[in-house]
Structure formats: C-alpha cells, structure tokens
Image (cartoon, rainbow, N blue to C red):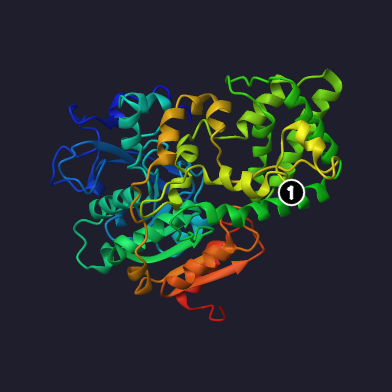
Amino acid sequence: MSTHNLPKSAVTPPSSVQPTVTQSSSVDVHELDRTDIESYYIPGGKVYERFFDCPLDHQEAADTRRVRVFARHIVPVGKEDQMHSLPFIVYLQGGPGFECSLPSSVKGGWYATAISEGFQLLLVDQRGTGLSAPISAHTLAQHGSTAAQTEYVRHFRADSIVRDCELIRKTLCRGRTSAASQKVALLGQSFGGFCITTYLSLFPSSISRALITGGVPPMLDSPDAVYHATYPRMITRNQQYYAKFPRDIARVRTIIEHLNAVAVVLPDGGCLTARRFQQLGISFGRTGGFDSVHRLVLRAANDLETAGCLSVSALTEIAAAQSFDANPLYCIMHESIYCQNGNASRWAAHRVREASFASAFEYQWDRVLQRSDPAAPVYFTGESVYPWMLDDYAELRRLKDVALSLAEYTGWGRLYDTDVLAANTVPVAAVSYYNDMFVDVGLSERTAQAIAGCHQWITNEFHHNGLGVSSHVPEYLFRLLKGDITDL
C-alpha cells in the first residue's frame, strides 16, 4: 500500500496531543464490548478492526511518544457472544516490514485449523507496517533530522513488537478469571517466529503455546553467518532454476547485457539495473517462484527481441514483483533483526557477497565475460539487501541517510534470553524447511535445540511459504503440541 498520504496522527511527537481514536471513551468499557468498533463478516468469521495506543518506547516511562497499532480480530461465526472466553491465537507476519492481509475467508488454510482448535484470531500489523504507524520516507520526515529519524526507527524491532502484543493481550484478556485463560497462543511465519522467540524470552508466562513456521531464528550477534549459509543455497536454487528452464540462461544473459548498456527507468522513477533485476530471485525461495520468474524473463527477453527495449508492461510487472519501496522497513531494518549485544550489521550481505561469492553473482557485463566460463549463467540473488538499493529504488532513495545510519548503529540490545529459553516450559512446535533459502535450517536447528521442549519438524516437502501453501503444516504442528506425533 502507498504510505505517502498517511495522517500525521499515525505517530505522535512528544509535543502533540494524541487523537482519541484508539481508546474507549470510558475506561470501564472493555475493548471487546465497545460498540464503536467497525465490524463485518467474511466467510467463516466476523472481523473487528481494532486500534491500540502503545508507547513508542515501552521501557522508558518518561518518553511520551505513542504509536497506534492495528489488529484484525476475527471471531468464528456463531461464537460472537464468546469473545470474552474463547482463547486468542495471535498471528505474527513475516518480514520485517510486512503487514497482515485481510483473508477473503477463514474457512480454509491455517485460519480454519486454528478455529477448529477452538481459537479466535488476532492478526497484528506489526509497528511500522500496514495500519500500524507505517514507516515511509514521508512519515519519517516528520521526525526531523537523520539522527532523530534513526533514533525513532530503532524502536521497531522484535522486542518492541512483542511488547506491543503484550499490551494488546492484557487489554483483550482483562477480566478473565484464571491465569490460564489470560494466556494467548502464538503463530509466527518467518520473522514472526523470530518475534515469538523474543516473546518466549520476555513474557513466557503470557503464552499458552507457540507454533513457528520457517522462522526459528539464528541466535547470533551479527548477520554475517546467515549469509555464509544462505548464499550457497541461493546458488543451488539458481542451478535448479536453470535446469528447469535451460533457455533462460541465454535470455537472462541478454537482459543483463542490455541493462548494463542502457539506463532503464521504471514507471515509478526507480532504476532497473542489472543488479536490481537479479533480485527477482527472491521468489526462488517460495513455491511457484521458478515459474513466476520465468514468466518475467520470457516477457523481457521477448521485448528485447521484438522491440529492442523493455515495454512499460514488462517494467510494471517487474516493479510489482519487488516490494522494497512499498515496504521500506524490510530493507532498512532487515539485517538488524540479527544484531545483538552492540554489533552493527554494516551491510553484511554485501560484504559477504563481495568477499566470498562475487563471481557467482556477478552482474557487470565486462566481468561476466571475464569469468572462467564466460558463457555460464548469470545467477539471481535471494533474501539479501544491499546499500546500492538506496539508489535503485525510488522510495528507498529518500531513506538513504537513515538506512546508512542504521547499518552503522552499535547500540542494539539483546533479543533473546538464552537462560530463559533453556528453562522454557511453554509448548513449542516449529517447522523448518530443509531447502529454505531464507532461514538456514542448520542455524535454526541449533536454536531449536536451545529452547527447552521445542519440537522441531524438518521437512523438504515445502519451501519457505509452506504455511500459506498447505493446511498440513499447521495441522501437523498442532498434532506435535498434543503429543500425537512422538517420533521427532
């Protein structure tokens, strides 16, 4: 979604007065009993659209700045009068920097699985995304200098997201009589699983159970090891892609040669460089990704063959496949999700690529021709962010100073408490995908072993988006939690 026209009230500077749009007019009215909440039905559920007023800095009482956090609350049809008693399952989206979408129905997928397990659903737009104080060049500019903007964005990591969720849990579960009924279940996809691991570290007594899909985090102090592990997986996926579409070897080389020779401007003002074209390979980490990239490659190559340039239609489709401008937090904060204990990211993916994988992912045409096999395929890249993106993407250009500042920041605190996780008593079930191009299975396995009672299922049946592809994934995880599967 575009964030250029967001109201200034989405974030409240210290000197401003927060509009009374997120709270009930009376403190005695429970959030679940409010009559001013917008609601409507979708197949299988009634949706309530709720906003919550949260501190920007949960740990600094003197900081009066607030952020407004949005969550879609979905109650199974026929159980609308049981909101005060039904347990909640809180869904945490992947990213960082991506909002939850409104489901067209909750009669299928993980939604139906969770409902069949007796839950009502809470889909949270993590701060900085969707309707939750979204980050954009426009909204950040309201905070003044680069230093002030950088300080503000530093409050948008997993620890702050978790504290927002804890405030929301307390609000929605207020008045429940037993400690057990005040707990929530958690479901986290990808980065959502990173957030769950932070939640287990900070507030384990608030969680009834946790399910993690493709997101058992590497518990590292810096991101370098992540890219040493994932670049080889990117190479493997490229080899598999070209084995499926061998004619794309020549097509991609033609496109890369063209993009080196011609300055191509996208309809939104961004630049389609050869290095940006390589980033289409992020789709290789998802089911169906090979086919979607092949379609774009075929379209672009056909344009060059028949017209000598890339059509507006092809450029629009390529830009639509790259969400970095629409979700800028993903780029400017991505590597910080791995930083702890005073370590800066310093563009780890770029550093590791240049030091160890430059030839494999070469995009400069003269250097492509100088490789030991000048006819070899040009490889796509995967889930990695680079400093040059701040020049090639139109919206990211306006965030360049902030992004560069964040990459050098050394004040990141601890995201995970290894002692608490080692003593964990919360039932945890996690799936890790053997061929995952985003979250390395080896690093995930090390973390799963450090969380007491974590049941980890490792499978090569799915890619990173398994949760959205098959209901077997959530069903199997719930069976793990119930003890129905005992051979893992």
Q: Quadrant of residue 270?
A: top right
> Dot 1 corresponds to which residue?
238
Tell me which amino acid carries mark 1. Asn
Q: Is residue 14 left or right of residue 307?
A: left
Q: Residue furthest bottom?
A: 487
- The structure residue drawn at horizontal position 73% and vertical position 20%, both measured from the top left corner, is 262
Q: Is residue 43 left or right of residue 157?
A: right
- The structure residue drawn at horizontal position 38% and vertical position 38%, both measured from the top left corner, is 128
Query: Is 300 rendered above or below residue 37?
Result: above
Indicate the position of residue 170 as horizontal and vertical percent values: 24, 55
- The structure residue drawn at horizontal position 68% and vertical position 44%, both measured from the top left corner, is 358
Query: Is 438 rendered above or below residue 41?
Result: below
Q: Quadrant of residue 257?
A: top right
Q: Residues within 10 Å of mark 1 (few under 14, many from 20)?
A: many
Indicate the position of residue 205 as horizontal and vertical percent values: 28, 66
Indicate the position of residue 109 as horizontal and vertical percent values: 55, 55
Indicate the position of residue 75 as horizontal and vertical percent values: 38, 52
